[in-house]
Image (cartoon, grey):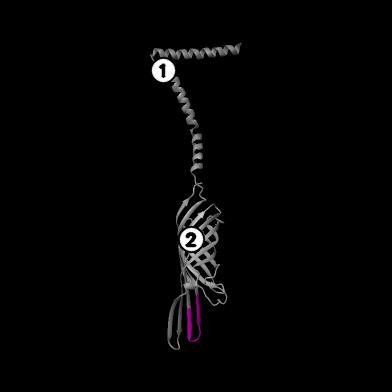
Amino acid sequence: MVIQRKLRSKDVGFVSLTEKLKRIAVNCKCKNLFSGSLTKCLLLGITGMGLNMSPLISQDQRQWRDTLETPNYTQYIQYGVKGGLNAASLIGDDLDELESKIGVCLGLFLDYKINSKVGISGDLLFSQQGAYLEESDRYESYECYINMNYINLPVLFNFYPTSNLSLKVGLQPGMLMSAKEKVRYENEEYNYKKTETESFKKHCNSLDWSLPIGLSYTFDFGLRFDLRYNYGLNNIFKKGDDDIVNSVFQITIGYVIGREYIHQ
């Protein structure tokens, strides 16, 4: 009974307070004051709850937006220029006396990094190859420069032990652009010198296949060092019982001009 009287007294107090508010509204000739104030209170309460929940909502929105907008930076395409030197020679039977010939290598490169560990790359290169031969005795000297210029298109599979270091292996087709032999003969006893240049391209295969293997290191600011060895897979000559193939050590320095990230 005591508890019921207390509850009734609370209800009466609440009703009497409500009636007082209504009377104030009537006396002020603002019949909508009470209902409007109540609406405003409700709106303020809801707004306050919204403000209290806004940090949580903003945080959830940020996490959702970051999930959608943040690209996978392990997958990208990059391209650039490169240039360097070749130490080229020819390998075959009875060619032990041939020495390496120094030439230039210039061109473009394109990398497609599939993920953080593997990728594919390709180059478009002008490459000076061939070999060098020198023979001499007391009075005579003989020099022969075998100059072969190729346009090479190596396609390589890349493995990345680290984000900057790449190990490469692939296949390289090369188109023969020119093949010339330059011979210098000198005889000091008779004071005789002679230089002759002759093309032998018509005797060579126009398409050369090589197996490139190497590594490269690309700095974060775009500079790249590339070391590669190309071993010939087919005879450079159209006819012949003995296979004579290209052998090229290549070192180049490149620079990444652009990089495009792929969103997944």
Q: Is 258 one of the magenta-colored residues?
A: no
Specify which label sits upstream in the sequence, 2 or 1: 1
Q: Is 142 one of the magenta-colored residues?
A: yes
From the top left corner, tell me how far across and down residue 110 is, in percent: 48, 57
Query: Which residue type carries mark 2?
Result: Asp
- The residue that label 2 is drawn on is 123
Q: Secondary structure at mark 2?
A: strand
Q: Residues within 10 Å of mark 2 (few under 14, many from 20)?
A: many
Res 178 quadrant in image: bottom left
Position of 101 relative to 194 (above/below): above
Mark yes or no: residue 221 visible: no
User: Which of these two is toward me, 65 or 8?
Assistant: 65
Position of 207 relative to 31 (above/below): below
* Proximity of marks 2 and 1: CB atoms separated by less than 8 Å: no
- Between circles 2 and 1, the one closer to the viewer is 2
User: Which of these two is toward me, 170 or 49?
Assistant: 170
From the top left corner, tell me how far across and down residue 92 is, in percent: 56, 73
Query: Which residue type carries mark 1?
Result: Leu
Report how far apart the C-alphas of labels 2 and 1 lie in the structure.
81 Å
The numbered disc on residue 156 is: none
Q: Secondary structure at mark 1?
A: helix
From the top left corner, tell me how far across and down residue 38 is, in percent: 45, 20
- The residue that label 1 is drawn on is 33
Mark yes or no: residue 41 visible: yes
The residue at 60%/13% (across/down) is: 3
Question: Which residues fall within the magenta stretch?
Answer: 132-143
Position of 182 relative to 15 (above/below): below
User: Which of these two is toward me, 72 or 180?
Assistant: 180
Question: Along the horizontal axis of the image, is 197 left or right of 89?
Answer: left
The residue at 43%/83% (across/down) is: 193
User: Which of these two is toward me, 12 or 54?
Assistant: 54
Residue extending furthest toward the bottom: 189
